């Protein structure tokens, strides 16, 4: 696929858009069985993942940490790169940070 320097779109996209405008229709290829399985798998993974906000809130509730500290803890976890951390690592960080906030 070539990149058109004028607008950042590939030639394939430009030709497809022209075809849609001229023919008033789109040709869509049905994915192969292998592609369908991959798509289903990716959607199932995405639908199981909780947001960082939900993960932090769940950990706080499970450890009886006051939700009044939610925004502060969420902010710190975000700086830590919380989306990339396991639940156990997040829980350890949140619990230890909460203890430090109590001192």
Image (tube, helix red, strand yellow):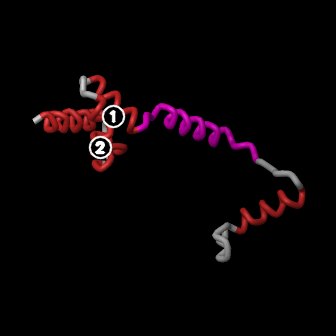
Q: Nearer the viewer, residue 90 or 2?
A: 90
Give 32 or 78, whichever is nearer the viewer: 78
Mark 2, residue position: 77
- Relative to residue 50, is residue 93 drawn left or right? left
Residue 59 coordinates in the image, percent (x, y): 30, 29
Quarter of the figure with the C terminus: top left
Q: Residue furthest right?
A: 23
Q: CA distance from mark 1 to mark 2?
A: 8 Å
| Residue 24 lies in the magenta-colored region | no
Q: Nearer the viewer, residue 81 or 86?
A: 81
Badge 1 element: helix
Q: According to the image, label 1 marks what residue?
A: 56
Taking the image as shown, residue 14 lies to the left or right of residue 92, namely: right
Start and end of the magenta stretch?
Answer: 29-51
Sequence order check, earlier mark of 1 and 2: 1
Q: Residue at x 83, y 57 (%)?
A: 20
Camera-nearest residue between 98 and 35:
98
Residue 39 location, x and y as percent? Answer: 60, 40
């Amino acid at each position: 696929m070539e990149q058109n320097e004028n607008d950042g779109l590939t030639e394939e996209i430009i030709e497809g858009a022209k075809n849609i405008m001229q023919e008033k229709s789109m040709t869509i290829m049905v994915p192969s069985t292998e592609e369908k399985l991959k798509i289903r798998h990716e959607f199932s993974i995405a639908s199981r993942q909780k947001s960082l906000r939900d993960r932090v809130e769940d950990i706080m509730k499970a450890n009886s940490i006051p939700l009044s500290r939610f925004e502060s803890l969420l902010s710190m976890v975000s700086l830590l790169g919380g989306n990339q951390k396991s639940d156990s690592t997040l829980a350890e960080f949140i619990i230890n940070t909460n203890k430090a906030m109590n001192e």
